[in-house]
Image (cartoon, grey):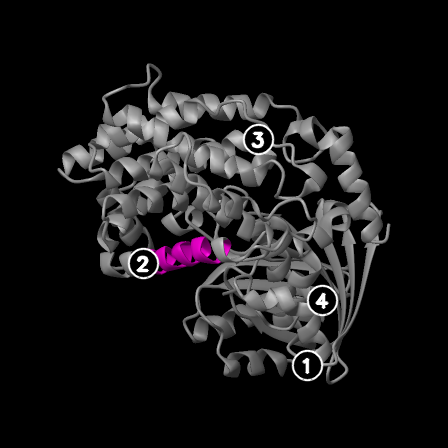
Amino acid sequence: MFEYAAVADLLSLAEKYNTSLAQIVLRREAEEYELTEQQVTEKMGQRLTIFADSIKEGLYDDRLSLSGMVGRDAGRIEKMEPVLLGNIAHRALLYALAVSEGNAKMHKIVACPTAGSCGIVPAAVFAVGEAKGADRERYCSAFFTAAGIGNVIARNACVAGAVGGCQAECGTAAAMAAAAVVDILRGTSEQIAQAATLALKNVLGLVCDPVAELVEVPCVKRNGFYAVHALTAAEMAMAGVKSVIPPDEVIAAMYEIGKMMPVALRETSEGGLARTPAARTVQNRLQNQQGH
Amino acid sequence: MGVFDIIGPVMIGPSSSHTAGAARIGLLAHYILKEEPVKADIVFYGSFAKTYRGHGTDKAVIAGLLGFGADDPAIRNAFELAAQKKFTINIGTSSEEEQHPNTVKIKLLGKYGKTMEIVGVSLGGGKVSIRRINGFAAEISGETFTLLSVYDDQSGVVSLVSSFLAEKNINISQMRVFRKGKHQQAVMIIDTDSRVPDTVVEKISSLEIMKSVIAIDPLR
């Protein structure tokens, strides 16, 4: 009854039942897995706690990752008063770096949609939620909205860097985050869909070329960038800015671009940043440590 | 695909394929061995071989072998935990080509002398598959209840085993049989919707042709 395959389906179901996108996503989940809505909400509540813990632990841990490439940038941001960004965007940047650095240091995280992009959604959601005094119910709603967008993208395109490049991972995360933020701001369903679309549209073509095949460079800083990017998309959508290309067509375009992307730029570390002299130096150092 | 496939899995970082997947392969091996492991020879292939240290793939496999899940912070201290339990570990890499880039071979010795060699692959997003057990082709995902039987190939075994399951109203969702050749050793892998009770496992084990029968729970 609540099955959806496209953003357009989500919008028409929300209209038909006169409810929010989050409610449609929640009801579909309950229906599909034969759970009560309360059980599904409780499970989301558990994820909420893990998200919040991953931010806290990421901020607390000032060690470097095993490779030594990342781990202390959240600390740098935290120590500085924002110079250019507003407080909310500054927090989003900070939280995204904290979670993503934590991931690189083997912290417990929630993949969202992937481990490499795990900082973006919680960072944007909590930075905005804290500023707007969101309660638990609001946060759950925001994450259900995010999941709805993520599920549509996974279904019609992909969320793996190896398949579609980074646009599929950080791009999807940014779209989910933008949608979730508009949910917190109590924007309309249409504005939620537009925020996701604007966020994804402006990540198209982003490649996955990680240094030394690790989830560190450029991944960690990119989480910071795209958490803020999601806020820009949400700001536009709240102002009534619309994408000329509709949501589902942008998702299809993302997939098409992903398939056109050379394999060297899809998580294989055979091109781009991963093949720069500096990256090779890191890779050689790590392989020698590993006893090759 | 559900909400918690996108907002999830909950895992120890940094990589769903190289860390969470590796832990799940280790845990499946632990379930299949059904004994506390005392020695493991772990060989990484492909991308696992190149990047296992940076991703903590080694720690993840070991933690799994010790019975920890992919979301357990114990993964970080897997080497220390193994040392405490006097669990001997050798780690190696191989440049041999494997079918899948994220492949690990684990040779295990259990506390009571049971030995086993499994080959597991990490498919991405934390999804895994055990592809070989003691040289036999296999396919175990850890997503359902699985019954693994090793026996001498002969006619009627499949229907006999499925009748034992039907007697207890256990629904089969998938079934695969692999064998080395006609009338040689065969492996039957049955996925079921519910747990196969111990009494049924014993009943199947008591068939004369059965070499071993193992019930594997879904991964946490």
Q: Residues within 10 Å of mark 2 (few under 14, many from 20)?
A: some
**Residue type beneath disc 3:** Gly
**Residue type beneath disc 1:** Glu
Do circles 1 and 4 both sit on a common chain? yes
Q: Looking at the picture, tell me which residue is in the foreground, B24 or B75.
A: B75
**Dot 1: element:** loop
Q: Residues within 10 Å of mark 3 (few under 14, many from 20)?
A: many
CB-based contact (under 8 Å), mark 2 and mark 4: no
CB-based contact (under 8 Å), mark 1 and mark 2: no
Query: Residue beneath label 2, please?
Result: A45
Extent of the magenta region = A43-58
What's the chain of the residue with tag 2?
A: A
Q: State the CA–CA distance, disc 1 to disc 2.
A: 51 Å
Is B1 positioned to the left or the right of B77 in the image? left
Front of the two marks 1 and 2: 2
Query: Residue beneath label 1, please?
Result: B208
Query: Residue beneath label 3, please?
Result: A165
Q: Residues within 10 Å of mark 1 (few under 14, many from 20)?
A: few
CB-based contact (under 8 Å), mark 3 and mark 1: no
Query: On the image, which quarter does residue B72 sit in?
Result: bottom right
Residue B89, percent from left and from top: 78, 70
Do circles 3 and 1 both sit on a common chain? no
Do circles 2 and 4 both sit on a common chain? no
Numbered badge on residue B153: 4
Q: Looking at the picture, tell me which residue is in the foreground, A138 or B146.
A: A138
